Image (spheres, helix red, strand yellow):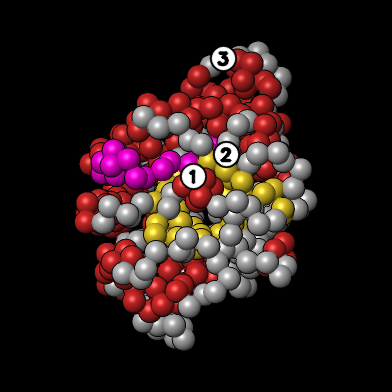
């Protein structure tokens, strides 16, 4: 059997909190709708990303699926972005549906609200996974068989949960400190599980596309489909190449002018020109290859920053107090049965809110600043904590002590 590219793309947009002030508390429960030209306006951002990334990327992917019967890919798409596309960019949503309708695009399961609930409330985590499963079934007619946690946050406990929940596979970062002498270019089995398989991101190859592609100072620049395919073909110790990245890599993080769309359009032809090379969905790779070893990951690993841990979301006191504050309200908010209040609470669990509060301004600071709609992490924290105060006021108005 030859080598296979397993391309997995992640689609997500949060509901960004507007500049919600202390004067709004108890007076205005609108946390997420800012003026159209405000940097936190979700509708404007979704329009921009759909036009720059989702629609042109999907147009090219659909053409590739038509031109190359062997081409396939996998994606995950959060409930929060699906809602926004339904509301503000039905054309983009339709383009995703057309991809899935080919039968060669697999959707991976995750939490509906792109939350870190697994680490704070297993009940809430499972509720969001079920919400996401139902949304994917409703819009795409698929039931996810493979799981990925928010930000690829993974450990042994998560693998055990996913195995018990009946998933055939789970995705994780192929971090050197975990793999040791091993390579991410094979199928593995998580420690302490019976049936589930583990696919680990080849972060070097993935980041060549996602982060380094447009960097003229990078030794690999310019990266062509031909050059990239040769790198993969020359790799001896491999059966699969797990290329995991954000969907917005195409057109948003790497602009059209960088040549990223040309690279995407030419990659299948260059890769498939070599004997026995193929593309596989995550499920196909799991079905095609037996695991070569077990991987033990007692500590949580993510796909973010140089540390590959949760410090991008939980690295300072602002982040910790915010996330503890939102989950401390879980039982009382769910107990109200107030669907509007519960939905606001869930939207405030989205991991992006805590990412915007990150103060790691050395190696990764520029990345955090690029993604944030706020002037600085402290503005993000203030707006978020004001919404938390308002949630508590809404409970008090219902006669519930927060």
How far apart are labels 1 and 2 at the CA level?
8 Å
Instruction: Check disc 3 and report the residue beneath it.
Output: 337
The location of residue 385, given as percent across then percent down, is 61, 41
Q: Quadrant of residue 213?
A: bottom left
For marks 3 and 1, give the one nearer the viewer. Answer: 1
Please state, as top left, top right, bottom left or bottom right, where the C terminus lies in the image.
top right
Magenta segment boundaries in residue numbering:
95-111
Front residue of 152 and 24? 152
Q: Quadrant of residue 92?
A: top left
Looking at the image, is mark 2 or mark 3 earlier in the sequence?
2
* Residue drawn at (36%, 82%) of the image: 222
* Residue drawn at (48%, 32%) of the image: 132
Instruction: Check disc 2 and report the residue beneath it.
Output: 168
The magenta stretch spans residue 101: yes
276, above or below 218, in the image: above
The magenta stretch spans residue 373: no
How far apart are labels 2 and 3 at the CA level?
34 Å
């Amino acid at each position: 059997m030859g080598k296979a590219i397993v391309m997995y793309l992640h689609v997500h947009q949060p509901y960004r909190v507007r500049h919600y002030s202390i004067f709004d508390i108890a007076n205005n429960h609108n946390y997420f709708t800012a003026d159209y030209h405000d940097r936190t306006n979700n509708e404007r951002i979704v329009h921009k990303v759909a036009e720059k990334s989702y629609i042109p990327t999907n147009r090219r992917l659909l053409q590739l699926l038509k031109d190359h019967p062997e081409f396939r890919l996998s994606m995950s798409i959060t409930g929060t972005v699906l809602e926004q596309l339904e509301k503000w960019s039905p054309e983009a949503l339709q383009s995703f549906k057309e991809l899935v309708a080919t039968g060669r695009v697999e959707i991976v399961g995750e939490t509906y609200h792109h939350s870190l609930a697994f680490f704070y409330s297993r009940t809430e985590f499972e509720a969001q996974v079920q919400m996401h499963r139902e949304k994917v079934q409703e819009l795409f007619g698929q039931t996810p068989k493979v799981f990925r946690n928010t930000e690829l946050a993974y450990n042994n406990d998560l693998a055990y949960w996913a195995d018990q929940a009946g998933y055939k596979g789970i995705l994780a970062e192929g971090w050197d400190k975990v793999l040791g002498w091993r390579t991410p270019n094979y199928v593995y089995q998580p420690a302490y599980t019976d049936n589930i398989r583990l696919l680990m991101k080849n972060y070097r190859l993935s980041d060549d596309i996602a982060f380094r592609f447009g960097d003229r100072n990078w030794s690999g620049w310019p990266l062509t489909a031909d050059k990239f395919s040769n790198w993969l073909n020359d790799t001896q110790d491999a059966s699969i190449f797990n290329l995991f990245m954000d969907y917005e890599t195409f057109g948003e993080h790497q602009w059209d002018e960088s040549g990223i769309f040309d690279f995407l359009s030419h990659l299948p032809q260059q890769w498939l020109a070599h004997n026995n090379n193929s593309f596989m969905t995550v499920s196909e790779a799991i079905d095609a290859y037996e695991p070569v070893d077990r991987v033990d990951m007692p500590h949580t690993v993510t796909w973010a920053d140089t540390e590959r841990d949760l410090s991008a979301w939980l690295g300072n006191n602002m982040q910790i107090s915010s996330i503890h504050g939102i989950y401390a309200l879980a039982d009382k908010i769910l107990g109200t049965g107030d669907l509007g209040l519960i939905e606001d609470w869930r939207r405030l669990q989205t991991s992006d809110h805590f990412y915007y509060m990150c103060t790691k301004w050395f190696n990764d600071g520029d990345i955090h600043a690029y993604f944030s709609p706020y002037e600085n992490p402290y503005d993000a924290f203030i707006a978020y904590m004001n919404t938390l105060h308002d949630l508590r006021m809404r409970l008090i108005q219902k006669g519930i002590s927060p």
